[in-house]
Image: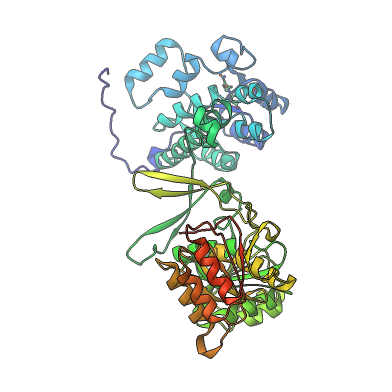
Amino acid sequence: MSAVPPVPSTQLDPASDETRRPVRRALVSVYDKTGLVTLATELHAAGVELVSTGSTAATIAAADIPVTKVEGLTGFPECLDGRVKTLHPRVHAGILADTRRPEHLAQLDELGIEAFELVVVNLYPFTQTVASGAGPDECVEQIDIGGPSMVRAAAKNHPSVAVVVDPARYEDVAAAAAGGGFTLAQRRLLAAEAFAHTAAYDIAVSGWFANAYAPDEQALESGFGALVGAQWTRGEVLRYGENPHQSAALYLSEAGRAGQGLAGATQLHGKAMSYNNYVDADAAWRAAHDHGDAATVAIIKHANPCGIAVGADVADAHAKAHACDPVSAFGGVIATNQRVTLAAAEQIAPVFTEVVVAPAFDDDALAVLTQKKNIRLLVVDAPEAPIVEMRPVSGGLLLQHVDRVDAAGDDPATWTLATGEAADDATLADLAFAWRAVRAVKSNAILLADDGASVGVGMGQVNRVDSCRLAVERANSGGAERARGAVAASDAFFPFADGLQVLLDAGVRAVVQPGGSVRDEEVIEAARAAGVTLYLTGTRHFAH
Ligand SMILES: NC(=O)c1ncn([C@@H]2O[C@H](COP(=O)(O)O)[C@@H](O)[C@H]2O)c1NC=O
C-alpha cells in the first residue's frame, strides 16, 4: 500500500455552514427520469454546470437546459450498447479528487480535469427486470456497472462530493445548490444512503445468481441458495426491548418499506408500539388469517392464543374468542381478518387491550375505540405469505419454509379415521377449526374447541401431558365444564396414551392429531376404549 499524505484537518463541526461545498458542477446519470427536468432546471438556475449520459442529457436538452454530454468530456463515444459510458478516468478523477488535498488539485490541473461537487445517479432496474420474468440475458444486461462505480466513488469522496441516488432527495439537492451546497454532515448522510443503495443492489444481484441463475447442486436439490442477503432499514427505535433494560428497534424489510406486513402497518391511534406489542401482534395477525374467509378473531398474550374463534361476523367471533379465557384476554392483542365494526368495537372497548390489528375499521368503530387513550389500532392488509422464515442462532441463521395452513393433511378429506365413528359434519367442522387454530399455539399445543371457538388451550409445556391438563383446566375453569363434549387438536403426536387419556377423562368427543408415534396403537386403543373418534392427519404443525 502506498503512503497517502495526511488530509488537512479542518477542526470544524461537520454540521457547520463553513463545511458547505458550493455546487459548481454536477454529473447526472439517471435511469428513472422522474423529477429530472425540475432538478435540472433548478440546478441550472443555481448556476450549476450539468454533465450527463445519453438519454439523461437528451431529456435535459429537450427542456432547453444547457448540458454537456459525457462524451464531450471524455472524448470517447458511449459504446457497447451503453456498457461503457462513464467508465473513464476523466469522469472518475473528477469524482474522486479529494479537493482538500493540494496535490489532488494540482494533478487535476495538470490533467485538465474539472472536479464534480455533485453526483446524481439512479441505477438500471435489475430487481424489476427479474420480477418481470425476463430471460437471463436481459437480467444480466440490466446489471448496472458504471452507475454503482460512480455512486461508490462519490460516496467515498464525500468530503468533496455530494451523492444522490433517490429522486425523493431532489428537492434537498435544489435547495442545497441554491444555498451554498451541502454541509459535511449532510454529505456523510448522503454517502451512507448511497452505500446502502449499492449494497442493496449487489444483494439483489448476488441473490439472483445464487438462487436462480447459477445455483449450485445443493441449491437445485433443496431450493436454498448458497447465499442469503437482505437489507433491513430502521423503521423506528422502540422505547425498550422485551424488558426495560434492553434497547430495541424495528427494522423494515423491502415489504415493510412498501407498507406491507405488520412492520409496514399504518397505526391509526394509540401510543407507540412496543417490542412485545410487535411480537404479539405478529402472532395474532397470523392466527387471524388461518381460517380463510370466515370472520376470525385471535386474542394473543405472550405470543400464545388465549382465544381464537370464527363467527357469523367479527363481533360474534370476538365474543367467542374472548369467552375462551377472559382472565388472560386482559392486556391482550386482538387481530381479525375483517373490518372492525361498531358492534365489535363496543365489545372490545371495555376490556383492557394493548393492540387491535385489522385490515380496516368502520368509522363508528374507530370513534368508540379512539376514546381509549392507550389502545393501539393498526391497519394491516392480509398477509403476503412469506415463503421462508429466518431465526438467528449463535453464529448462524436458520431458514425454513413457512408452515402453511394448506399443508397436506390440513384438509379433513385426507385424514385417516383411526378409531370411533366418522364425525358428523358439525363435529368435523369443529375438528377442522381446532386443527387450524392449534397452529397458533406454541410448545406442545393442545386446543379444545366447540362451535368454532377455542374453549381451552394448553401450551408452553415441556411435555404434552401437562399441556392436556392445562387445556382441560382452562376449559373447566370456574366450574364451566367446557371440556365435556368439546373436540381436541394436538399439534404433534401423542408419544404415550397418558396425554390423550387426560382429554378422554375430561369428556372430549373427538380428537385430531398427526399420528406417527411408535406407540400409536397404544394411543388409538385408549380412544377406542373411551369410544371417542380419533383422526390422524399425517402432518404436524409444531411451533416452538
Ligand atoms: N456503463 C456505464 O459507463 C454507465 N454509466 C452510467 N450508467 C447508467 O446509465 C443510466 C443512465 O443512462 P442514460 O442517461 O442513457 O439513460 C444510469 O442508470 C447509470 O447508472 C452506465 N450503465 C451501465 O453500466
Q: Which image quadrant: the C terminus? A: bottom left
Viewer-nearest residue: 279 or 422: 422
In-image side of 265 versus 21 (left or right): right
Q: Position of residue 345 (x, y in %)?
A: 65, 78
- If the picture is divided into quarters, which one holds ligand 1? top right
Name the residue rendered at 32%, 18% in the picture: 103
Quadrant showing the N terminus: top left
State how the image is colored: rainbow
User: Which residue is depicted at the point 63% across and 61% down?
Assistant: 290
Q: Is residue 170 above or below residue 86?
A: below
- In the rendered image, the vertical position of residue 263 relative to residue 151, given as above or below: below
Q: Is residue 310 left or right of residue 8?
A: right
Residue 507 as seen in the image, left or right of residue 117: right
Kindly tell me whether residue 339 is visible in this rendering: no
Across and down, in percent, residue 12 comes to 31, 41
Pick the residue in front: 518 or 245. 518
The one of 172 and 410 positioned closer to us in this rendering: 410
Where is residue 158, by image quadrant? top left
Residue 53 at x, y = what percent?
61, 21
Report the side of 431 relative to 517 (left or right): right
- Asked where in the image residue 64 lies, by quadrant, the reply is top right
- Is 515 drawn above or below residue 109 in the view shown? below
What is the quadrant of residue 160 in the picture?
A: top left
Task: Between residue 102 and residue 482, name the one nearer to us.
Answer: 482
Percent of width and height locating residue 2: 27, 17
